[in-house]
Image (cartoon, grey):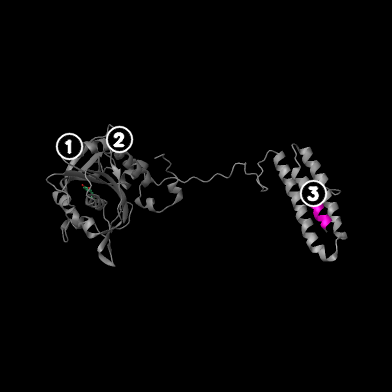
Amino acid sequence: MEQLLKQIDAYKQEINASAATDEKQVEDYRIKWLGTKGIVKAIMGEMKNVAPEKKKEAGQLLNEFKQYAEAKYEELKAASTGAVQTGFSMDISLPGDPMPLGSRHPVTLMRNRIVSIFQRLGFAVAEGPEIEDDWHNFGALNLPAHHPARDMQDTFYIQQNPDWVLRTHTSSVQIREMEKGKLPIRMLMPGRVYRNETVSARSHCFFHQVEGLYIDENVSFADLKQTLYFFVKEMYGKDVKVRFRPSYFPFTEPSAEMDVTCFICGGSGCNICKKTGWVEILGCGMVHPNVLSNCGIDPNKYTGFAFGMGIERPAMLKYGVNDLRLFSENDVRFLKQFTSAI
Ligand code: DAH
């Protein structure tokens, strides 16, 4: 038995030192060690000389030795055919199966596009919670309890706590930014909002908005207009015309809605713009002094502008999507069509 052990050790060393640079040498190795008249076969024959009580142990040793010789053979074979030797019997240098690439959601693409334009003007990005308290969604925005303008947005209330709502707009994040007390503020706030509306091709119970807020000393309506002009030119091209219509939002004074010439028909009138030649894209205005004071900002020292726009509508127009529900159905046949780089 001891003899056998020694012999196996010596063989192992010899196997270990074996090398092969071509197929012929690999075959020589096979014949020498693993062939019918090879060493492995021969040493297996030694079993019959082992004492019965040692047979089990010897059997294991010999088996292990056989595997050792075989593993080396695989290794030499793989190396001589140029494959990478890994200790596995597979070739990891072969190209793998390609991973199917996903694509960004069209709403994400549009949001990134909007955000990147304002980032170039120095706006930073902030986010806020989707479950909001009444104060941030309404109260601080100059919409006290029972204010009729609360009816402008059908709100989801949360049963467990009557003070909580699913935010109806991203304007709530304006309040959170102002409350931080760091001025000036130049922020863009994208996010999902919720309204208790019947789901149809044109309205949904959740959608996305981007809010903008700029607060500093001496900010004027001219700054608001210039900022939005820049945005429109970058977003829709330099030939697009802009118009502001007076409007009402409790949190801005004065307030306006901004339209751009229809980017489908170029202003001549089509179904998308309901034959008017104009498409409404956002609401805006100068931040109401009450809103500033609600957030601890002195309205005599600071002024600012704000705006809010939906993301789905411009995305529908850009990508020719005619049903809002497609955005949230997660059908890959729909989603994989959007491969823009941004
Ligand atoms: N929060 C408004 C909405 O959801 C949009 C809006 C209008 C936001 C005017 C503003 C603004 O910041 O100044 O309809």
Q: Which one is earlier in the sequence, the residue at label 2 or at label 1? A: 1
Q: Which residue does the image show at 68% across and 38% down from the upper left?
A: 82
Residue 40 lies left or right of residue 92; in this view the side is right
The C terminus sits in image quarter: top left
Secondary structure beneath label 2? helix
| 318 inside magenta stretch | no
Q: Does the residue labelled 2 lie within 8 Å of ligand 1?
A: no
Q: Residue 222 carries which label?
A: 1
| Relative vertical location of residue 48 with respect to residue 336 in this rendering, above or below | below
The answer to whether residue 289 shows anywhere in this view is yes
**How far apart are the alpha carbons under marks 3 and 2?**
78 Å
Residues shaded magenta: 2-8
Q: How many marks?
A: 3
3 and 1 marks in contact (CB < 8 Å) = no
Q: What is the three-letter code of the residue carrying label 3?
A: Ala
The crowding category of the residue bearing disc 3, from other C-alpha atoms within 10 Å (few below 14, some 14 to 19, many at least 20), is: few
The residue at the far right in this view is 49
Which residue is tagged 3? 10
Q: Is mark 1 within 8 Å of ligand 1?
A: no
Q: Residue 194 lies in what quarter of the image?
A: bottom left
In front: mark 3 or mark 1? Answer: 3
3 and 2 marks in contact (CB < 8 Å) = no
| Relative vertical location of residue 1 with respect to residue 236 in this rendering, above or below | below
Q: Which one is earlier in the sequence, the residue at label 3 or at label 1? A: 3
Prevalent SS, magenta region? helix
Q: What is the three-letter code of the residue carrying label 2?
A: Glu
The residue at the far bottom in this view is 160
